[in-house]
Image: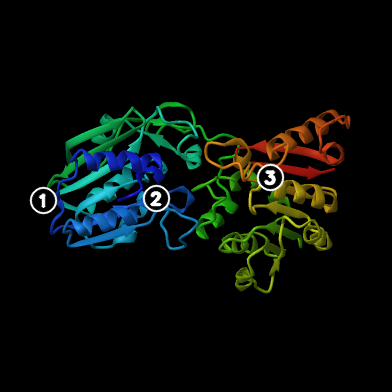
Amino acid sequence: MERTTMFLEEERFLEGLWAHGMFRAEDIAGKECLIIGGMYFWEKNYSVTLNDRLMDMGAARCDNMVLFSYLVLESFCDLTDVEEAIGAVHYDYIFVLNGMEKTRRICEGVRQVQEICRPGGKIFVAARTPKELSALYSIESYEDVWRYDVDDLCALFGSCALEAKASDDGLFIGALFTRGAQTASSSVDSLFYVRSGARITMGEAEQQGVFCNASDLDAIGIKYRVGKSSMDHNYLVNYERFLESLRTQPVRLLELGIFFGASMRMWEEYFPRAEIYAVDIEPECGKFATQRAHVIQADLSNREEVSRLREIRPQIIIDDASHIVSHQLLALFTLFDVLPSGGIYILEDLETSLHPEQYSDIYRDCPLDAYEVCSRIARIAARKVPDDDSIYADDINRIGMAAELVSIMTGSVVFIRR
């Protein structure tokens, strides 16, 4: 029996639709099926579960299109990549599990989905509604573009007829369409735009905000499927304002945490004259080393091993390692002082401090979490009075007095040394 208690909310919603008979065996048996999306946060992959189920129900074929994932370099960005991913193949049943929220050119994306569905075929679409704007279900939802109601979906899937619809307490909606024989088309007058929190007319200039201009760093991050990019956490457009002045300089960049090596490739391309030093506890990460990107095996919970990293004398430090608070604080307290004037320290993934509903207590293993420490440092930097009296007072006061700037943004904080 499937462990539905381990599913994310979208998956629970879909499981409920299966239980209530929205998807019929006679519509699937002998049919060629496509699953778009379904790989979610924390490496959960509902598309595999669905693929197996469809084949057990007699599907003749079941393909998968993986949307943006830092776990899969060959993944595609959004629904506007459907025709590139699929080619000339057409399907009888298409499941769009996610992608509606993040596809900025949504009319083109939906047109492509309809284009690859045979006349008379089925298209099931799952989407989030304006009611679901919190971080309770997926941290990725911070950077979603659109939200939908059923009327929006019917307008977008204009070459289809609505067959069935369902909702889950207003948070998610599902719509099952039958593809018509007409040429694929898609249009909608307005949609709910997440950034502004209101509906906007399509074609109206979207509120981009100060950090949402075109970003070379973000484009490179998307190219290498880096989780920091705007397709996931959306850190890079923020970082570039601080990093671009160093882009052509022969800097030394120290990044804590390697994972699959994607960010190493990104930093190499963005900083063509830089020496990259990447640290990870896993010995197999050595395979990601290149002439300019050096791999150091170290345990970031070990004070002595972290202290040895000071010898690199970096101008830029990025902590994207375990996200465990004790590791984050040890690195910050140990390495910040080695930065030169104008040096940059970036501490990522404050989510482990701020979202106990998503992260277990294993991450918050200190008297003060990383966000609290950073906010105290910001206070000292603003006042230039070293009066913190917490358990970490010495480190907080020292860094606060040495900081020119402390910028706390969604999920991360940037320090610049005086």
Q: In this view, does 167 lie to the left or right of 400?
A: left
- Residue 393 percent across, percent down from the top left: 84, 36
Residue toward you, 214 or 331: 331
Q: Residue 130 carries which label?
A: none
Residue that carries the numbered disc 2 in the rendered image: 78
The answer to which quarter of the image holds residue 400 is: top right
State whether residue 103 appears in this view: no
Task: Tell me: residue 214, above or below residue 152.
Answer: below
Three-letter amino acid code of the residue under disc 3: Val
What element does badge 2 sit on? loop
Quarter of the image that includes the C terminus: top right
Q: Residue 325 carries which label?
A: 3
The alpha-carbon separation of the residues under discs 2 and 3 comes to 33 Å
Query: Mark 1 falls on what kind of element?
Result: helix
Q: Name the residue under label 1.
A: 26
The residue depicted at 50 percent of the width and 32 percent of the height is 207
Q: Which of marks 1 and 3 is in front?
A: 3
Q: Which amino acid does label 1 sit on?
A: Glu
Tag 1 near tag 3, CB within 8 Å? no
Quadrant position of residue 88: bottom left
The answer to which of marks 1 and 2 sits earlier in the sequence is 1
Q: Where is residue 230 in the image (x, y as percent from the top left)?
A: 52, 47
